[in-house]
Amino acid sequence: MKFTVERDALAEAVTWVARALPTRPVVAVLGGLLLRAADDGLILSCFDYEVSARMRVAAEVAEPGTVLVPGRLLVEITRSLPGRPVEFTDDPDGVSMICGEAAFTLATLPAGEYPDLPDLPHLAGTADGGSLAAAIGQVTPAASRDDTLPMLTAVNLELTGQTMTLAATDRYRLAVRELAWSPSPGTGDATVLVPARTLADAARLMTPGEPVRIMLRASGTPDSADAMIGFEAGDRRLTTRLLAGEFIKYRSRFPDEFGSTADLPAEAFTEAVRRVSLVAERGTPVQLSFGPGRVTVGAATQGHARARETVPAEFSGAEPVIAFSPGYLLDGVVAATAGAEDGRVRLRFTSASKPAVITQSPPGAPGGPGNDFRYLVVPQRVQQ
């Protein structure tokens, strides 16, 4: 095996593919990156029986071949290399990497023990890369990180006609985004649970204006052992097994009516919440107090620091005070105005103890970045 590849292209591919490597591989070979050099370029891939990632880069291949090398080590070495072409060649002790005056020899892993990458499932349809990546970025922060409830660590992905709906929750907030997509002929409606972390990695392969191919194999039920979803854009491909279980009935969680509505400048409000929350201890909320033409953001640590800041706001309603976890509040505001040129956010609620809903304000153009996004968040009680 012998090939040469540009350092920047190699670094980009290695870094992206390595994100799918298992943190603690159950067997050593699963911690490796598979490099396959052929006439059509260099393919880097990894697979741990749950998630697979693959990327192709241009390379000058003198001698085709395949080698399995330690993935994390390859990432660190590649990042450290100077901006010159990198040459890989077979070595009696493994594989050598030469970049300018820098030379490394890597011990290889037994490629024969490495699992075959999964075949792509059936093409379900396509979506615009920019729109899908934005939707993923809006909902994944709301997914739970508690592995004791696997269902809540996933994004619920519904495919209904030409509408795709993504939803995620950790029981304290709920994010939902709808967007258009183009189903393939014969593709029926489906609802699947996609691991949120893997879906966020999939968003990294998406580019605005470039279609993303979405492949799906549900095998009749989401509980099937071979149920899988795949995303492919350009030279990048990622697949993951679907999670078993049934997502919560989330649509009924959104209130139909609200007693109070506030329209806020997103950037100024976000900065105020960030500054004020500096004095808040872990678990301490920020309190929003509304008045004519303004909202006062405040927080305090018992016996210690206090902070407050006023931001212009349009408010109507009978309940002028509500409090939230600053992190949960900021996630909703940032997501609701993602991609908006002049971001304003709308906060609607009925009382200080019932869930509030954050959306873009005013509603964007049909199909716009924030038009079909809703974020429900449970308020916190302020300690008196």
Image (cartoon, rainbow, N blue to C red):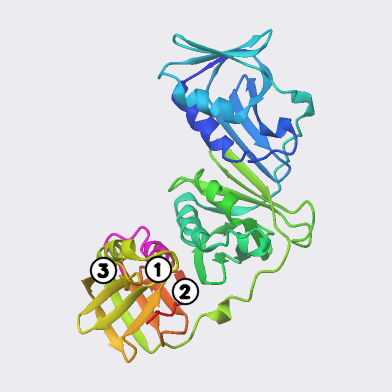
* 74 relative position to 52: left or right: left
- Observer-side mark, 2 or 3, equals 3
| Circles 2 and 1: CB atoms closer than 8 Å | yes
Q: Residue at x 37, y 81 (%)?
A: 322
The part of the chain drawn in magenta is 330-344
Q: Which residue is mark 1?
A: 329
Q: Residue at x 38, y 64 (%)?
A: 330
Q: Which residue is mark 3?
A: 307
| Picture coordinates of residue 61, whole percent (x, y) | 58, 15
Residue type pointed to by label 2: Val
Q: Quadrant of the N terminus?
A: top right
Q: Residue at x 77, y 62 (%)?
A: 221
In terms of secondary structure, where does tag 1 sit? helix
| Picture coordinates of residue 239, whole percent (x, y) | 65, 45
CA neighbours of label 3 inside 10 A, class few (<14), some (14 to 19), many (20+): some
* Residue 153 in which image quadrant: bottom right
Q: Which residue is at the front of the view, 207 or 115?
A: 115
